[in-house]
Image (cartoon, helix red, strand yellow):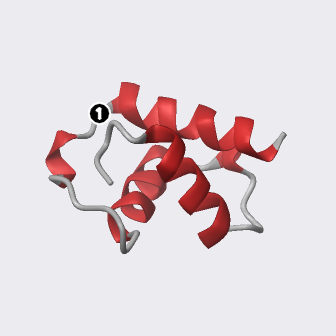
């Protein structure tokens, strides 16, 4: 997975952190959790606020 795979990342985060409300996750934690996913294989420095926000929104949508 890469930073652009927002839906795949959101699904993986939902499976990895089922008790977390994604609406309240700080971007620093979100960044760390994405980088810790076993399927994630991208440069941690390539993320930015826009990407993290897109992942967070996809995760929120995944919960609905």
Res 37 → quadrant: bottom left
Q: Residue at x 38, y 62 (%)?
A: 32
Q: Residue at x 26, y 40 (%)?
A: 47
Label 1 secondary element = loop
Q: Residue at x 73, y 67 (%)?
A: 18
Vertical placement of 27 versus 50: above or below? below
Foreground pick, 47 / 42: 42
Res 48 → quadrant: top left
Label 1: few (<14), some (14–19) or many (≥20) C-alpha neighbours in 10 Å = few
Q: Residue at x 72, y 61 (%)?
A: 20
Where residue 31 sits: x, y (%)? Answer: 38, 53
Where residue 39 sits: x, y (%)? Answer: 36, 67
Quadrant the N terminus occupies: bottom left
Quadrant the C terminus occupies: top right
Position of 39 compared to 29: left or right?
Answer: left
Is residue 26 visible from the viewing direction of this image?
no
Is residue 8 visible from the viewing direction of this image?
yes
Where residue 58 sits: x, y (%)? Answer: 60, 36
Vertical placement of 6 versus 37: above or below? above
Position of 49 compared to 60: left or right?
Answer: left
Foreground pick, 63 / 27: 63
Marks counted in the figure total 1
Where residue 8 sits: x, y (%)? Answer: 50, 49
Foreground pick, 30 / 64: 64
Which residue bears the numbered disc 1? 48
Vertical placement of 18 versus 60: above or below? below
């Amino acid at each position: 997975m890469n930073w652009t795979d927002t839906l795949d990342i959101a699904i993986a985060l939902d499976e990895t952190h089922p008790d977390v409300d994604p609406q309240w996750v700080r971007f620093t934690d979100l960044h760390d959790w994405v980088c810790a996913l076993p399927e994630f294989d991208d440069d941690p420095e390539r993320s930015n606020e826009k990407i993290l926000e897109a992942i967070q929104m996809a995760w929120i949508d995944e919960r609905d």
